[in-house]
Amino acid sequence: MKINRQDKLQHLFSPGSVAVIGASNNPGSWGYGIMQSLFNFPGKRIYPVNPSFTDVLGFKAYATISDVPGPVDLAVIVVAAVRVPDILRECVTSGVKTAVIISAGFAETNNEGSKLENEIIEIARQGDICFVGPNTMGHADSNSQVSTFNWTRGEILRGPVALLSQSGNMCMRIIRYGNDTGIGFSKFVSTGNEANLRLEDYLEFLAQDDTTRVITAYIEGLREGRRFFRLARETTLNKPIVVLKSGGTEESAKAIKSHTGALAGSDEVYNAAFMQSGVIRVSDDQELCDVSFALLNQPLPRGNRVAILTMGGGLGAVAAESCEKEGLEIISLDESTLDKLDTYLPPRWSHRNPVDMAGISITENPAMYSSLIALIEDKNVDAIILQAPVGVFNSKRLSEILGFTPEQTKALKESEEKSVELVMDKIEQYDKPIFMVAPFPHINIADSKNSDTSERKRIPVFPNPHRAARVLRHLSWYRSYISSVAGKTSPFA
Amino acid sequence: MKINRQDKLQHLFSPGSVAVIGASNNPGSWGYGIMQSLFNFPGKRIYPVNPSFTDVLGFKAYATISDVPGPVDLAVIVVAAVRVPDILRECVTSGVKTAVIISAGFAETNNEGSKLENEIIEIARQGDICFVGPNTMGHADSNSQVSTFNWTRGEILRGPVALLSQSGNMCMRIIRYGNDTGIGFSKFVSTGNEANLRLEDYLEFLAQDDTTRVITAYIEGLREGRRFFRLARETTLNKPIVVLKSGGTEESAKAIKSHTGALAGSDEVYNAAFMQSGVIRVSDDQELCDVSFALLNQPLPRGNRVAILTMGGGLGAVAAESCEKEGLEIISLDESTLDKLDTYLPPRWSHRNPVDMAGISITENPAMYSSLIALIEDKNVDAIILQAPVGVFNSKRLSEILGFTPEQTKALKESEEKSVELVMDKIEQYDKPIFMVAPFPHINIADSKNSDTSERKRIPVFPNPHRAARVLRHLSWYRSYISSVAGKTSPFA
């Protein structure tokens, strides 16, 4: 039975065909938006079902699901709640394997809705069909390019992060924000009321999913807490799990009760369980994306001892404060490092950590790279926060600032690439992450839109030191967890 | 003497002529960048001084300051530290009124530097000249369009916010970030070592400056603490002061000592003094800009009771949690409000605060506006956080989503503008601020680049509820301060 359910999930994420029951030609309606989102589904075996239309967005429409020729792996149901039980029965009769029930108006509303929800649970049990929802925004898979959301127009950005969300809107926020910052998603599910498929089912599936390297989740309340934490303990040793859990305050918990009917549970109990199972708990959607990006691109630090390399004393002081507030240590540098820095930097440098390069010019990048490598090589340092001038790691921009000729630009680019290569090698060799804090806060944490085609690891760039310090704390804790439980230094090794 | 100094500051910010001693044609050098920044200075009475050049960036160059024809109100000095005393003496002899000493290598370095600094202090005292710095990145005024920074190319964005910063790089970060989010600056100063002009001098000037409505500052340590807090107590009743103060942790305080030689002082003492003088203390540069924007565009809330209007239950729960963690109250709505909402919203709405509009469609904006106004009118509500669909306050985007014809787009725009007008009127009438949390986090807190030409107040848009809640807490506290001290409801009234 359990294997069966996991097989069904395979059909959910990689269906051979999709029917949309309640498909529509009316812009603004869900049945229209979902049809649009399915445009990129390859093979286009898409069957709109709606007796009011002969075709929907160019696809031949059918009056009922039983009229559809050929097998349907996945039915998306977007009709009024009262009609869902009959529709689901028809799906069972027609041999549909899985369903996504977008419709709302079930247990999250009133007794009437609860009765409807019990009815569809029973239909699914007897009919051997799995479903997402009800009251879900949908699900998507970037590899099969199936999407039952009504807002994923165009191709879905591929990548190694999966997202399970107990809120559809939060799912949308995280996907959009992640995409903007260079994070691609393998699969994402708005889990809705979890009347049939539960967050724990998806988690079990994702743990074995080769396209997923990091699992993230927005959680309001767990229906199978023990199962979740058992799965998490097994999974986090090989795949990081990053969780945003709400309901930690009184009114927030009440809001959750009214949202999906879930009980938020004691925040302390959740916290302890997350820590004991290696789950990284974050406090907002931005942090969720920041941590995921860093996990994929940088090694885990051996400890919490940070060196700061900065272009200005004030920025260094603020960065040090951010680190200390997150429980990180601003360590004393080794004597040999101080000696090296003396040879690289102008005499006015701070002679301590934070290493203030004291107004180093943007033309002095080589000195900056040498200093960076000296810090990586320092045995007291576990991680580095770099606040570099705007041209660092960006020879194009630097050339513009300096008004370089094409030849000069080319030479700068080559020398820059060599330096970056060297820094990246050192990061690998010494197993020490570097986080950059941008000189200008509007710079994104990634410069490339597609995280999947980029083979090369990237240095995360944060708009302020607080965000960098927050991520470092998580990574340091996570390494100590997998190290103490399994003697590992990386989940991916 | 004090009046004299304030007069001198007038010359600093609105000079009739500027000399750049150490001006250069070498891209990447400070002497070159500063000359570029002065391009927008009207009248172009700019005198580069450098014996190595006959002209700099097209301006005739002079060998020494005494060779310059006509009076010089402001001299920018960007030469090696050891040469600064002689240069400053020449400035005095030539009748220069004020100077900006960019050069570093003074008290922030060693005994030698301290001696140099004492020397220029004495020269200025005897010669009756004021100066910014040394070890400063410069200063700028958006009204006179003078800038001695080496990075403010092009016109400086005008606006009512002033910034004093004890770190040049932090000054640059805040200006860039502010400009990006629609905040214009009246004047900004990187105060450097404050050997002559101190932060307190600028503060006294800004308190009387008509172009400045909000004063912001990045502070590492105050040299005249008593004077600062006396000035602040007088000023904050009419002009908000927003301060980012670092040095609250051990290594951060040490870093500050090594940066500008300032003593960070006890964080608790600073905190108490800020609170007693009505100064809003923020924790990072982003918060500084967020608070400034809100102060200029929204009324101060009467208290800390918040209503949340949201397009999704999960978003509502997370927003409620953010508010509660900031000490704000998620209040129970008045019975009459619940009745009104029942008539506006789909039956599945949450029937409580947070008001979850339960998957309201983007075509149902009128219901959303009505609900918003019902919340403004609720006597229990002091402020509103709105998490609305993407089309709200953005009829252009909504028209695109719905594939509207030009006629439909026009009609939507008109109806939308009416609704926005109505909401804005209600905000004024009831004195209750609205903060919007964007459905997608990459939306800026402002949609317009120029904050000065926009007469109309704007609704701040934050990428997550945490930032909105943080700002609300500050505004609520600030109102209670000016109300208890002076019986005022707004600093500007």
Image: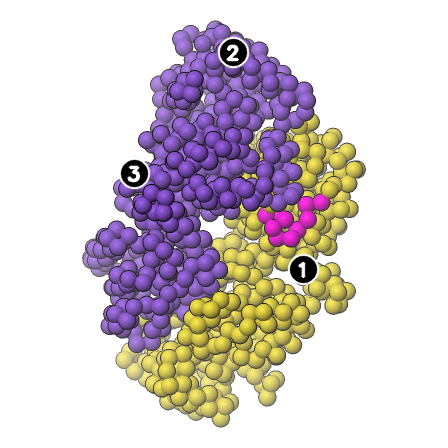
Chain colours: A yellow, B purple
Residue receiving disc 2? B126
Q: Tell me where the magenta segment starts and ends, as one range.
A: A322-331
Q: Quadrant of residue B203?
A: top left
- Identify the mark at residue B453; answer none if there is no mark: 3
**Is there any visible trace of residue A258 in the rendered image?**
yes
Compared across the picture, whether A425 is left or right of A85 comes to: right
Pointer 3 local density, CA inside 10 Å: few below 14, some 14–19, many at least 20:
few
Pointer 2 local density, CA inside 10 Å: few below 14, some 14–19, many at least 20:
few
Kind of residue at badge 3: Thr
Q: CA distance from mark 3 to mark 2?
A: 44 Å
Q: CA distance from mark 3 to mark 1?
A: 49 Å
Pointer 1 local density, CA inside 10 Å: few below 14, some 14–19, many at least 20:
many
Q: CA distance from mark 2 to mark 1?
A: 59 Å
Residue at horizontal 65 percent and vertical 57 percent from the top: A475
Q: Chain of mark 3?
A: B
Residue receiving disc 1? A477
- Asked if the magenta segment contains residue A1, the reply would be no
SS class, disc 2: helix
**Is there any visible trace of residue B157 in the rendered image?**
no
SS class, disc 3: loop
Indicate whether A176 appears above or below A318: below
Residue at horizontal 65 percent and vertical 42 percent from the top: B251
Kind of residue at badge 2: Gln
x and y percent of residue A148 in the render?
Answer: 43, 72
